[in-house]
Amino acid sequence: MARQGRPLPKIVALLNQKGGVGKTTSTANLGAAFSRLGKRVLLIDLDPQSNLSMHFGVEAEPTQPSVYDLLVSDEIDAASVIVHARDGLDFMPAVTELALVEGELAQRPDMQRTLERAVAPVAGNYDLILLDCPPSLGVLSVNALTMADEVFVPMLAHYLALRGLEKLLETVHMVSQGLNPRLRVTGVLLCQHEQQSLHGRAVVDEIAAQLARYEGTGLPWDGCAILQPPVRRNIKLAEAPSFGQTIFDYAPQCPGAGDYMQIALHQVERWWPTPVEPAATEPAQAPKPRAKKSKPQTAGAPTQDAPAAGA
Ligand SMILES: Nc1ncnc2c1ncn2[C@@H]1O[C@H](COP(=O)(O)OP(=O)(O)OP(=O)(O)O)[C@@H](O)[C@H]1O
Ligand SMILES: [Mg+2]
């Protein structure tokens, strides 16, 4: 059950129906970054390829129920699906059978809400839930959108990266008009950005300009921006899961770790802004007198380039 008095967790779906764009890499490493920032994080693997667990090097027991069991059986309780990965970081693993879920859920009248309902008993134990979606817009992704507050769209930093996203935005629009009116697409998560090249920087500008066109439309992606900073191409991010590690375990000083941590820091500021300290009531202390007299100016008139005083 949700703890008394705790606010609901922030729920974010990482969604792009294109394969290989960085959804799982970003879910695992952003999750790890948030947990290192003191947030209690739950990651849910909604992809039958079940790649997410590779990032944590934690073997699930053979008897461990998965997201598949959680979705198809009313007997499974959410707590039994949770695997503890790191301090403050839990996940719910997927299995290949998850590919069958579409057919099995089709019998249920409210199949789009199955995930939300099943996770509800544990949701209140977390500050943040990240949903690693499969590369499709089927029933699993719709279940993710139905329970999410926000969508991050991971994409490769290429020209025309936004092409083909019409279907994704259409699906978000549909869900936001019925099942989940609070749903918003708030961030494009650029992966494999090539910061050094002119081309890489031009791609970022191009995508930002395209997103700006939605401003003021009132659509669920009105105000969507590139999450900062774009995540640079970094081989360490590709290597880490083969060692069962997040980027913060494997190479905490590498650019990939820095980029994901910066994104997490910006989101923490946005989602959980620190309350502003009330203004001090006592008068501010007078500045202390300078210990030393400032050095006398060396001889010679100031040059014409010297900035004017007070500039
Ligand atoms: N910034 C990066 N630098 C280098 N390699 C990366 C980066 N981000 C992701 N990769 C690699 O790109 C590949 C695809 O990433 P990932 O599996 O996260 O994509 P995905 O969108 O989850 O794919 P799928 O749609 O198949 O689930 C992986 O081999 C991953 O290690
Ligand atoms: Mg994936």
Image (spheres, rainbow, N blue to C red):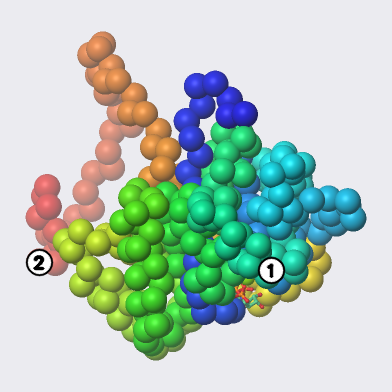
Residue 107 x/y as whole percent: 59, 59
Q: Is residue 60 above or below residue 95?
A: above
Q: Could you say which quadrant of the image residue 66 lies in? A: bottom right
User: Which residue in the rendered view is the most extreme toward the right?
Assistant: 62
Asked whether mark 2 and ligand 1 are closer than 8 Å, the reply comes as no
Is 256 or 7 nearer to us in this picture?
A: 7
**Residue holding disc 2:** 304
Residue 266 x/y as whole percent: 43, 51
Q: Nearer the viewer, mark 1 or mark 2?
A: 1
Q: Is residue 112 above or below residue 49?
A: above
Residue kind at label 2, given as amino acid type: Gln
Question: What's the mark number on residue 100?
Answer: 1
Label 1 vs 2, first from the N-terminus: 1
Q: Is residue 277 above or below residue 153?
A: above
Residue 8 x/y as whole percent: 48, 35
Q: Could you say which quadrant of the image residue 271 lies in? A: top left
Q: CA distance from mark 1 to mark 2?
A: 77 Å
Q: Looking at the image, which residue is at 35% across and 77% down?
A: 166
Residue kind at label 1, given as amino acid type: Leu
SS of the residue at dot 2? loop
User: Which residue in the rendered view is the most extreme toward the top?
Assistant: 282
Does residue 158 appear in the picture of this structure? Answer: yes
Q: Looking at the image, which residue is at 45% across and 67% down?
A: 153
Q: Is residue 12 above or below residue 272?
A: below
Is 283 or 16 nearer to us in this picture?
A: 16
Q: Could you say which quadrant of the image residue 120 lies in? A: top right
For mark 1, does the 10 Å Cα neighbourhood hold few (<14), some (14 to 19), or many (20 or more) residues? few
For mark 2, does the 10 Å Cα neighbourhood hold few (<14), some (14 to 19), or many (20 or more) residues? few
Question: What's the mark number on residue 272?
Answer: none
